[in-house]
Amino acid sequence: MSTSVEPNIRELTKSEMEGLVNSMLAEMARGLKEPNQPLRMLHSYVDHVPSGQEKGDFITIDFGGSNMRVMHVQLKGNHEMSCSGHKWAIPEEKKRGCRPSDLFDWIAERVLEVQSKLSEVNFKPEIGFCFSFPLHQLTIKSAVLMQWNKGFDIPECIGKDVALLLDEAFERAKSAFRVGALVNDTVAVLLARSYESDDCQVGAVLGTGFNAAYWEVWENVPKLAPDKYASTMKTIINTEIGGMPLRIDNQIDKIVDQQSNEPGKQMLEKRVSGMYLGLMFKAVNELDGISLPSYSPKVMSLMEEEHLKGWERCEQISSRSCQYVACALAAIHARKNKAAFEVAMEGAVIERYFKYKERLLTVLRADLGISNISITVVDDYSAIGAAVAASMDWNGDD
């Protein structure tokens, strides 16, 4: 990593974006071929597309970086579904320095709280668990936590099966609930939208963090057992694209990286996601001799929309974020050969930041030349997708 850096951030040139797309493609190919690469390209154990006819009432957990939602998801068949539930801010004392049981008992308690309020609903015992951190998937119901990000640090959880940790919490609470499917949030978003639409190829989340998952053909993943399934069968790959290694070439990215919990990791995520945009804004202004705090993306969006003090920096930071996200989506697009290419996106930045979707599409279409791409902004789809996963029949992944 270079120690000679420019003072401030700047937007990427078209040539730089094209080079970044090619670098991402190369890293993706390496990750699909061999394990333990910078881009992990993780197998999700989702090995077929939902039919849209799956049915049932499910409780799902959507455990993200800032909040946790416990939802009642009703899959009605005929590609129709509904979702309602409750949201809690994850207490800071449950994010770091506690025991695994402290966190997972808290999760189980919230589930049982929701169940008690909906006692008239005949819920399936299988919980859909959406866990938005890097996982090494063992089966559709089992996955080991590889590392924390998004400000979490509970070392005893690393290397543990998070589904088992939750099942044990339900046992301690004398509940019959068990994890029926464990999925990453991007996998869940893609599954939920695929329940509705045949055109969706990518599920992405741009909120506290950033990641994307996509449908891949089995034969294009050399590191997977070639004889397990038919070569043309589809599977979802969780790219963990936020971990794309990037060189630091300016003082602002250097400051943000050094102030993070994991210096040197999640380098793409630190350019684009809600957890870091405010830190970037603060660092940029300090470099200009202006004292402004680390605002949330919601405040930055309002500043930009209303042209409040500092709005130009907000625009610069969000526009550069769009460029990096566009490069990630363009790299996935380059692996596909589809007439229609839909991306389902969820998360606070894409949902609520001023003109973010519009700018992102402009970069994709005008700068990167991708004319057939569309973006569907969704809400609660990570929770819905966890229910879809829990409802599906799997090939012996027990």
Image (cartoon, rainbow, N blue to C red):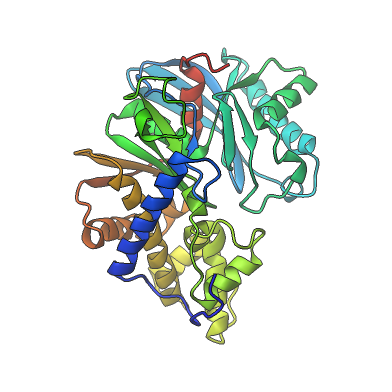
Query: From what the image shows, is residue 218 above or below residue 65?
Result: above
Residue 70 seen anywhere in this rendered image of the structure: no
The reply, left or right, for residue 346 in relation to residue 198 is right
Figure quadrant of the C terminus? top right
Residue 171 seen anywhere in this rendered image of the structure: yes
Q: Nearer the viewer, residue 203 or 217?
A: 217
Q: Nearer the viewer, residue 346 or 253?
A: 253
**In the image, what residue occupies the spot 73% across and 39% down?**
157
Figure quadrant of the N terminus? bottom right
Quadrant assignment, res 276: bottom right
Quadrant assignment, res 319: bottom left
Query: From what the image shows, is residue 156 above or below residue 253?
Result: above
The reply, left or right, for residue 232 in relation to residue 155 is left
Q: Position of residue 110 (x, y in %)?
A: 68, 31
Quadrant assignment, res 168: top right
Query: From what the image shows, is residue 151 above or below residue 158?
Result: below
Q: Residue furthest bottom?
A: 289
**In the image, what residue occupies the spot 72% across and 17% down?**
175
